[in-house]
Structure formats: structure tokens, C-alpha cells
Image (cartoon, rainbow, N blue to C red):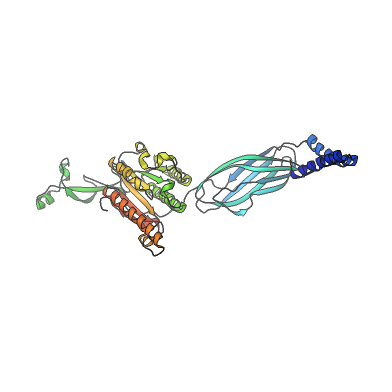
Amino acid sequence: MGALRAGASAACLGMVILGLALVQPLCFVAALPLAAWLLLGFVSGRPEPLLEAHRTPSSTFPEPGSRVAMSLVVRNSGAALPFLRLADALLPGMSLVEGEPTWEGELAEGGEARIDYSAVFDRGAYEFVALEALAEYPVSAMRTSLSLACPATLIAPPPAMVPPRQALSARSARPFSGTSRLRRRGSGTDFAGTREYSPGDPLRSLNWRAEALWDLGIVNVFEEERAIDVEIILDARAEAYESLGLFEAAAAAAGSMAERFLSEGDRVGFLCYGSAIEWIQPGSGREQRLRIRRAVGKAALGTHPVFERFDSIPVGLFPPGSLILLVSPLLGVDLLPLRSLASLGYAVTVLRPDPLSAQEARAEGPGSEALARRICALEAEVLMSRLLRAGIEILDWKVSRPLAAAVLHAGGRP
């Protein structure tokens, strides 16, 4: 019931009560027109709108910052509607740049109403469910509201960044060519250096000249370019990030590193570790690139007691000897789980987005704030040194600088 009918009903009831109280027939006579109009509205009823809505976005996988044109068409399969108002909801993270997500007017039988507007989207997943409709009938002041189903899903990935070019390799390689360099004993590949002989080395790898010169068993070490298996893990635990901006930087870094390895011919898998686990099995090619982009675009911070530590990482899904690239600011409780990953034979590298540089940690300011930042910097240094001693490589990235400027600290050299 609309506001007009509610007011008319209240006035009619008031006149009836006043007539009964004062015993005045004129009050009943004055209430008759309002009562007749209200009764006519109930008797004539209101035809149920028969509307169908269709939504057509210009892109369901928009590039960061690009404009997406949204088109909605509503068809009337029932009786004519004297007045119809349509409104589409603007979701959080969505910014209107052109047009309006509303329409109002008369819609004839078999007619169409169209809404066209453009918006830009922040990184994330957007689920459009329905279009809100309100039909009004001026004669009886009746109104009907309904939701018109017109679902659509948009996933906006993070912006691409130039990845660092430091060499990262796995413990084992696949029998396909790639750009990752794997050191092994043998011949027919690029010479990488020598090392001391150990039992089990083939005789053909012995360097006889070096042995005669130094009186030691020396073998040649070669490098070959092979494709590797890479598992990228994006840390989405809310307690690991001090701000949403830091998580957005981590998501962009994870997507950019996936693009790098895929372009080098490697097999790449993706795991989002937060309030739940979303895993994409290793693969390569264009379809795998799109799968990982969608997964990174949908990644969101969350908390779950089971996933407070990295103990619940499903390592059984990862190919043996693969490279595990963890994108995380790291917490103190992450030391032991990462050591366990390295002990299982995986090559573990941590891409650590750090919002504080050494200069910021020592910057002048309020005493308590400067001390807190200095303590955080020292705790991070201790954690990194322990990880390095465990043979884990660390790509240290100051988020105020380009990702390509990340500094690689090799395992074993704190």
C-alpha cells in the first residue's frame, strides 16, 4: 500500500470514529467517497507485472581501470504499466563514470525499457543478482515491487607489474624446454662450473685436467634450460596484513609472478590461503593464465582457525621437487611450517612485500611510534635470517618501489 492510500485509509477511519463519537451523519457522508475509492482499488486489484530482465556487460573480465559498459533490457510481457521505476544496485568497489543505473516511465504492453551506464571496478569479484522494479498505478494508488533476476559475474584482476628477473629454479625439471636453468652433471649443455667429486658421480663428468692440477677429484657441472613446476601461494590471512593496500600489492605481485612463469613455458599452479583454500592445479597456456587471473581477482582477506598457520597447506597436491613461491608478509609462526616445506624437497622462495623500509623504521617521529617500527623491523630481520639459514630464498620487496626492484637473498647466506 502506498503512502496516499495509507493516508486516505487513516482519514476515512478518523471520520468514522468522529461520526460515532459526535453522532453526526455528515461525518459518515464525508467518509463515503474515500471509502469508495479505497474499495475500488481493492476490487479492481492490481495486475501482476510480467517483466523479464537481461543484463549484458561489455566485459566479464575487465582489465584494471578499464571502463565496462553495462546494458540492461527489461521486456514487458503483461499489461501496460502506467508508471515503472527500475534501479540497478552499485556494488562496493564499483564507480559510476557515465550514465545512470535507473529508468522510470510508462511501459506499454510488449514494450522494452533500457538502462545503459558505464563503471570502473577495483580488483575483486562482483556478483550481480537482480534488478529492482517498482510498478505504480495512479488511479488506485497501488504499487508493486519485485526483483527481476538478471545475474552476471565480473572479475577484475589486479594491475600487472613488471616482475623481478632473478633466476628461480626448482629441485627437479620437466622433460620440456623452458627458460629456468637447472644445474646437473652431464654434457651437451652450457658449462656452469666445477665442484668436488662425490661418490656416485659418473666418470664422464670428471675434469681430468683439474684433478691433475689440484690432486682432487673434480667434476664438471652444466646448466640446461628446462620447464619447471611452480606453485604460487598467496597468503590471504587477515592477521598477516596491516592494511588492505598491502594485500592488494601482494595479490598484484602473485598475479605478475604467475604471468612471468607462464610466459617462460613453466607449469604454474595457484593456491589462495586464507579463510578457505582455493587451488588451481598446475597447468600452462592461455586457459591456465585466465584461470589464475580469475582466482587472483577473487582473492580476499579472511580468517579461519584451521588456517592460522601454514601447517594446513596441502603439500600432497604439489608435484615433488617443484618450486613453491609464497607471497606473504610473513608472521613469526610461519618459520617452522616453511622449514618443513623445504625439508620435503621443495625449493621454497618467499616474495615478501614489506611496507617499511629501513629508512622509515629509523625515521624521526614520536618516540613510541619510532620504537614500535624499529622493533617490527628487527623481528622481520631475525625471521628472514632464520629462513635463509634453512635454505629458503627471500625476494624482499619494498611496496613503495617497483616489483622489479625486489632484492633476492639466496638461502644459506643471511
**Residue closest to the eye, 399 or 167:** 399
Question: Which quadrant of the structure image shows residue 284?
Answer: top left
In the rendered image, the quadrant that contains the N terminus is top right
Res. 230 visible in picture: yes
Residue sitting at x 90%, y 41%:
26
Residue pushed farthest right? 25
Question: Which quadrant of the structure image shows residue 5?
Answer: top right
**Residue closest to the eye, 264 or 244:** 244
Image coordinates of residue 351 in percent, x first then y, are 36, 50
- From the viewer's perspective, is residue 393 above or below residue 200? below
Q: In the image, is 285 to the left or to the right of 49?
A: left
Q: In the image, is 43 to the left or to the right of 99?
A: right
Image coordinates of residue 185 in percent, x first then y, are 21, 45
**Residue closest to the eye, 197 or 359:** 359
Question: Which quadrant of the structure image shows residue 131?
Answer: top right
**Residue closest to the eye, 127 or 340:** 340
Residue sitting at x 53%, y 53%:
66
- From the viewer's perspective, is residue 312 above or below residue 263? above
Residue pushed farthest front? 21
Image coordinates of residue 97 in percent, x first then y, are 59, 55
Image coordinates of residue 325 in percent, x first then y, are 35, 46
Res. 280 visible in picture: no
Count the numbered circles shown.
0
- From the viewer's perspective, is residue 380 above or below residue 363? above
Residue pushed farthest top? 43
Q: In the image, is 355 to the left or to the right of 36?
A: left
